[in-house]
Image (cartoon, rainbow, N blue to C red):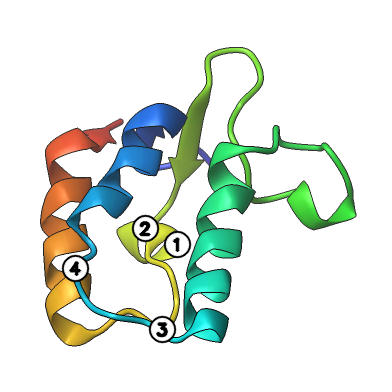
Amino acid sequence: MAKQFKISSVDYEFCANVLLSDYSQSEGVAIGEFMSDWTDFALGYDKKHQTKGFNPDDAYCYVDSIDELIPPKLTFDDRQRFIRKLKKNLVQL
């Protein structure tokens, strides 16, 4: 089944610029690791990256739902800002 959306891995990485809340160290690590899975590793890099990661041919992340790209542990306000930023950069296929 074809994916519904794509976003450049670079554009996705810069979505983090809208995160304004203070996070604990463990929360910050969880957010960073989640985003790193999409931006730093190509699909198929290892067992963890069979469904998460950018396409090595075009550097886009392909997803069925925006929710797949939203990091865990975000505050409500950061989540809303992050979603708005994602939508500006997301391409519907």
When the figure is inspected, residue 17 is found, relative to residue 41, above or below; the finding is below
Image point (81%, 37%), residue name: 44
Spatial distance from mark 1 to mark 2, Cα to Cα?
6 Å
Residue receiving disc 3: 73
For residue 34, side relative to residue 72 (left or right): right
Instruction: Tell whether 54 sits left or right of 18.
Output: right
Amino acid residing under circle 4:
Leu
Mark closer to the chain start, 2 or 4: 4
Kindly identify which numbered label has been placed on residue 20.
4
Mark 1: give few (<14), some (14-19) or many (20+) Cα within 10 Å: few
CB-based contact (under 8 Å), mark 3 and mark 2: no
Q: Quadrant of the C terminus?
A: top left
In terms of sequence position, does the residue under pointer 3 or pointer 4 come before the other? Answer: 4
Identify the image quadrant of residue 68: bottom left
Amino acid type indicated by mark 2: Ser
Q: Quadrant of residue 21?
A: bottom left
